[in-house]
Image (cartoon, rainbow, N blue to C red):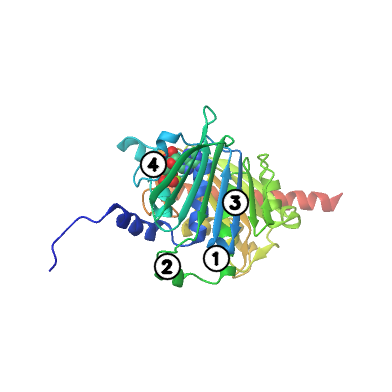
Amino acid sequence: MAKIHELSVNLTNQIAAGEVIERPASVVKELVENAIDAGSSRIRVDVIDAGLKQIIVQDNGSGIAGNQLELAFTRHATSKINTEHDLFNISTLGFRGEALASIAAVSQVEILTNTGNAAGTRAEFTAGTKTIQEDAAAVQGTQITVKDLFYNTPARLKYLRSPRTEMMKIVDIINRLALGYPQIALTLVNEGRTLLQTAGNGNLGQTVANVYGRNIASKMIPFSSSDSDFTVSGLISKPELTRSTRNFISLLLNGRYIRNFQLAAAILDGYGTNLAVKHYPIAVVQIETDPLLVDVNVHPTKREVRLSKETGLRRLITGAISDALLDKEVQGSALANL
Ligand code: ADP
Ligand code: MG
């Protein structure tokens, strides 16, 4: 056996990147989440070659101070939590301090940022190491350019799907982020062509129209309900508007897109016998709750979370949806009687 030794920082960052940065869509997710956490009202994502050649994310958020830039790209360095208590009271999308270090470990990164108080800063990182930092003119906010993703991890490159599929995954994550944050104007541009542009005026119906089209948005029904622990609200499709997969169901927990089979089933239960077998609704279900009830620290990508009082939440969702559909029937028949 060889002698035991500690791994280099670059190597541990690459190992972490293996978990957090699976594909180009992971980079887009992490950078947009950072932009949201920075309080941005406008975020633009530009992609070339399904994100493998280049991903640019530009925001008008808080910016990063020049003397904090190196830290921002250091693993386990974050501005979002301090104490153990904070770890169980997460109100931001990020908190692990891993994304920037991981992305920089498997790509070439350029960052241009300005906190609005002084000159801006420009820096470059190659394979996780900062090569340049200088003052630079920049508007308030942050622009991060990620080039040649996975250029130094050929195994990861091989594992990727076709550019078309990778692009669809980017579109999907942007759609979910848009639905979680109707108050943020989000733009996705692919090779110069605008694929999505949300109004950012806080109107969920309009965001659904931006994401799925006007026709679908016009066939959605609002619902809302709350108990002492949760508030649920959103838009669901009329029973006659369905899809053959569950992919059009978006669960947004305090803005975070999550996957949860039980909660998705609770939505279907709300439809009762109104849905044919293997037909699934289009649904945007926003859940607001005290962060203390949510354990986000389950998986590096945070797509799955643990929820206290999940049974109550399921009941709340099912009830709110079945009430909304019932109201719709009553309204429909009232109209028919006119
Ligand atoms: P985390 O989001 O978990 O804190 P990251 O590696 O994604 O970890 O980011 C590290 C830190 O860099 C963040 O805590 C934040 O302070 C800062 N940061 C990253 N992106 C932005 C941004 N777009 N605007 C302002 N600050 C940012
Ligand atoms: Mg982050």
Q: Position of residue 29 (x, y in %)?
A: 51, 52
**Residue located at (58% from left, 38% from top):** 60
Label 1: which residue? 166
Q: Which of labels 3 and 4 is toward the front?
A: 4
Q: Does the numbered disc 1 mark a residue whose Cβ is under 8 Å from ligand 2?
A: no
Q: Residues within 10 Å of mark 4 (few under 14, many from 20)?
A: some
Amino acid at circle 1: Glu
Tell me which amino acid carries mark 2.
Answer: Arg
Marked residue nearer the N-terminal end (3 or 1):
3
Q: Which residue is mark 4?
A: 70
Residue 241 image point, x, y percent: 70, 62
Q: Secondary structure at mark 1?
A: helix
Tag 2–tag 1 contact (CB < 8 Å): no
Disc 4 to disc 1, C-alpha distance: 30 Å
Front residue of 1/36: it is 1
Residue under label 3? 45
Which kind of residue does numbered mark 4 sit on? Glu
User: Is residue 217 toward the left or the right of residue 288 in the image?
Assistant: right
Callout in the foreground (4, 1): 4
- SS at mark 2 in the image: helix
The residue labelled by disc 2 is 156
Q: Secondary structure at mark 4?
A: helix
